Image (spheres, rainbow, N blue to C red):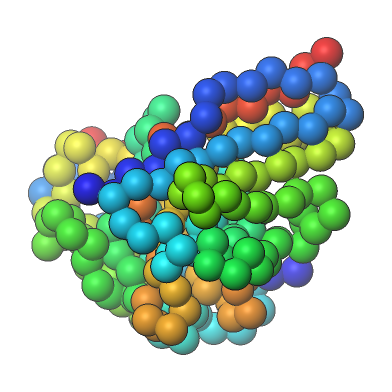
């Protein structure tokens, strides 16, 4: 069974930089996994941030960036703001029409 | 503008089935996949499967095979997700989401429905 792992929680100071990661239980995440990232606040549908590793979705501020670092996908927030306090999810395309979400990271900005 | 509008909240007894609908507008329904994603209370997002509205071909996560059926009615640009043999573990918000066709080599969920709460309780 494929498991995608994210840090359960992270904290960052306002104005700071944080990198959240997304790893596979077996194997490496590469651009061929087409990692995408979503932000979610309580009671709301997810908002698309990044797709195909590093492409920002329309309207997403450039303080959000995506990459593959080593064997993990990464979401970096540079200059964190209070309203970045949210849950963040990655999802990987595993091929053959199968997708797997990570468990999500609860980011606290304080 | 692209919109996915889902049906309203449901309360079901254990063992029953539920069908959630997702009406698409603002684009050509048959071009993009419809994915279904659920989120149990206090838990993360879970991908359930996807359907091609053009062909009706479906791919389900292994966990849901045999329990879920995804269909569509192209005449009204609406996708459906039926989940059978409900248990309390199926209590969740169910989302539909749009995804580009694989041929674009763009892989993500670009628009989301508002979510439908399904509560399973006796």
Measuring 81% from the left and 48% from the top, which residue is drawn there? B67
**Residue depicted at x 57% and y 27%:** B117
Query: Measured along the vertical axis of the image, is residue B20 above or below residue A75?
Result: above
Q: Is residue B99 above or below residue B9?
A: below
Q: Residue A27 appears at what percent x and percent y?
A: 61, 83
What is the number of callouts on the image? 0
Picture layout, residue B114 above or below residue B38: above
Visible residue check, residue B71: yes
State whether residue B72 is above or below residue B32: above
Q: Image quarter for residue A109?
A: top left
Question: Percent x, y for residue B14?
Answer: 85, 24
Is residue B39 in view?
no
Residue drawn at 14 percent across, 55 percent down:
A59
Q: Residue furthest front?
A: B75
Name the one closer to the observer, A84 or B100: B100
Q: Quadrant of the N terminus of chain A?
A: bottom right
Answer left or right for A57 relative to B60.
left
From the viewer's perspective, is A24 left or right of A71?
right
Q: Residue at x 42, y 36 (%)?
A: B5
Q: Seen in the image, is A73 located left or right of residue A62?
A: right
- Percent of width and height locating residue A81: 15, 43
The C terminus of chain A sits in image quarter: top left
Q: Quadrant of residue B92?
A: top right
């Amino acid at each position: 069974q494929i498991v995608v792992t994210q840090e359960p929680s992270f904290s960052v100071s306002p104005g700071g930089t944080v990198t959240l990661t997304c790893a596979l239980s077996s194997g490496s995440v590469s651009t061929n996994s087409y990692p995408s990232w979503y932000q979610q606040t309580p009671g709301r549908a997810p908002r698309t941030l990044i797709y195909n590793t590093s492409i920002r979705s329309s309207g997403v501020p450039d303080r959000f960036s995506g990459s593959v670092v080593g064997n993990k996908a990464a979401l970096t927030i540079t200059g964190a703001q209070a309203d970045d306090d949210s849950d963040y999810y990655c999802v990987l395309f595993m091929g053959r029409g199968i997708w797997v979400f990570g468990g999500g990271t609860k980011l606290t900005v304080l | 503008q692209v919109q996915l509008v889902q049906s309203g909240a449901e309360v079901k007894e254990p063992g029953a089935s539920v069908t959630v609908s997702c009406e698409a507008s603002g684009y050509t329904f048959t071009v993009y996949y419809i994915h279904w994603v659920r989120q149990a209370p206090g838990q993360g997002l879970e991908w359930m499967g996807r359907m091609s509205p053009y062909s009706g071909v479906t791919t389900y996560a292994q966990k849901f095979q045999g329990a879920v059926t995804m269909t569509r009615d192209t005449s009204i640009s609406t996708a459906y997700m039926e989940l059978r043999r409900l248990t309390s573990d199926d209590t969740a918000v169910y989302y539909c989401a749009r995804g580009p066709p694989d041929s674009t080599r763009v892989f993500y969920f670009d628009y989301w429905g508002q979510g439908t709460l399904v509560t399973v309780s006796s």
